[in-house]
């Protein structure tokens, strides 16, 4: 029995390589932008008394000046926050594209209806309308189903195994792209909190250094140290919160797509087994 058309592996490898390049560039660019925002925007002289970002105090109520004074950990946290936003947007578009043009649950239901009526061509046409990774996997199984049905010499049991294997191979090619860069978001959950904690520690060191001076404590240094600790803590927690929420959202969507593929694949295999045995 001839093999059904396989998904374009060269295209998948090219897409994977492009995704790796995007991830590397995005990380570098996010850190650069984070530093520039911290240095040029938050460190703008207009935010400080006497127009001196290095030695002057932030103007009363000027949040940008306060954040700038929170130290060099801030641009790192800003870079991590930008990474969380960028990779969340990227995953949103990739997963949406994988789901196709219509509702996935409704699509699977229509496929099952066509299978029940034996209308394989309509099911394949429905996959072409839906598009996306889910439709591509199901279409591979349907093409193998159609091919096996047309070959009267094939053993039904072997054909059933071949259909199942075809679906598994197509899934192995399509689904990894959905999980790509998810590790970056998962890492940001921990890195955001730890980097914020680092800023907290450096801020508290400055605060206690102000208290350790002889005579009256340096009020400005003490205030800056406490401000640095709190700002870094808040930014780190905020970054980690966004990262963990987006990670759970995307994981849920990926699980839903995987379940839809398994459900449709099971229907294809069972329909063939029941009609040819």
Image: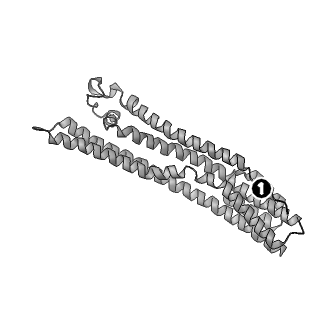
Q: Quadrant of residue 104?
A: bottom right
Q: Which residue position is annotated with label 1? A: 126
Residue 20, percent across and down? Answer: 58, 44
Q: Quadrant of the N terminus?
A: bottom right
Q: Nearer the viewer, residue 89 or 32?
A: 32
Query: Vertical placement of 68 versus 257: above or below?
Result: above
The extreme right residue here reads: 152
Left or right, 25 with respect to 63, comes to right
Could you tell me which residue is drawn at 52 percent across and 42 percent down? 86
Query: Vertical placement of 243 versus 64: above or below?
Result: below
Residue 186, percent across and down? Answer: 48, 53
Could you tell me which residue is drawn at 57 percent across and 41 percent down? 22
Residue 103 seen: no
Residue 9, percent across and down? Answer: 71, 50
Left or right, 74 with respect to 150, comes to left
Could you tell me which residue is drawn at 18 percent across and 37 percent down? 219
Left or right, 195 with respect to 2, comes to left
Residue 78, percent across and down? Answer: 42, 40
Q: Quadrant of residue 135?
A: bottom right
* Disc 1 packing (10 Å; few <14; some 14–19; many ≥20): some
Q: Nearer the viewer, residue 154 or 204?
A: 154
Colouring of the image = one colour
Q: Nearer the viewer, residue 171 or 230?
A: 171
The extreme left residue here reads: 215
Residue 253 seen: yes
The extreme top residue here reads: 50
Count of picture labels = 1
Q: Secondary structure at mark 1?
A: helix
């Amino acid at each position: 029995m001839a093999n059904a058309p396989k998904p374009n592996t060269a295209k998948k490898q090219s897409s994977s390589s492009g995704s790796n390049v995007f991830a590397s560039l995005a990380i570098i660019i996010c850190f650069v932008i984070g530093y520039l925002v911290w240095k040029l925007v938050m460190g703008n002289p207009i935010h400080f008394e006497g127009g001196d970002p290095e030695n002057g105090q932030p103007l009363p109520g000027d949040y940008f000046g306060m954040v700038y004074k929170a130290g060099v950990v801030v641009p790192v946290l800003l870079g991590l926050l930008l990474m969380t936003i960028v990779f969340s947007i990227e995953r949103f578009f990739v997963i949406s594209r994988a789901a196709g043009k219509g509702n996935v649950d409704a699509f699977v239901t229509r496929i099952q209806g066509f299978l029940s009526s034996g209308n394989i061509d309509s099911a394949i046409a429905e996959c072409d309308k839906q598009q996306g990774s889910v439709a591509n996997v199901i279409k591979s199984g349907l093409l193998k189903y159609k091919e096996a049905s047309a070959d009267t010499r094939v053993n039904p049991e072997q054909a059933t195994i071949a259909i199942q294997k075809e679906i598994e191979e197509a899934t192995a090619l399509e689904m990894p792209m959905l999980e790509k860069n998810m590790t970056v978001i998962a890492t940001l959950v921990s890195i955001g909190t730890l980097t914020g904690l680092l800023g907290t520690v450096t801020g508290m060191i400055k605060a206690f250094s102000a208290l350790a001076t002889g005579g009256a404590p340096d009020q400005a240094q003490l205030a800056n140290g406490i401000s640095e600790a709190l700002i870094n803590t808040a930014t780190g927690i905020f970054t980690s919160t966004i990262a963990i929420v987006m990670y759970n959202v995307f994981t849920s969507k990926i699980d839903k797509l995987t379940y839809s593929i398994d459900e449709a694949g099971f229907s294809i295999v069972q329909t063939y087994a029941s009609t040819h045995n």
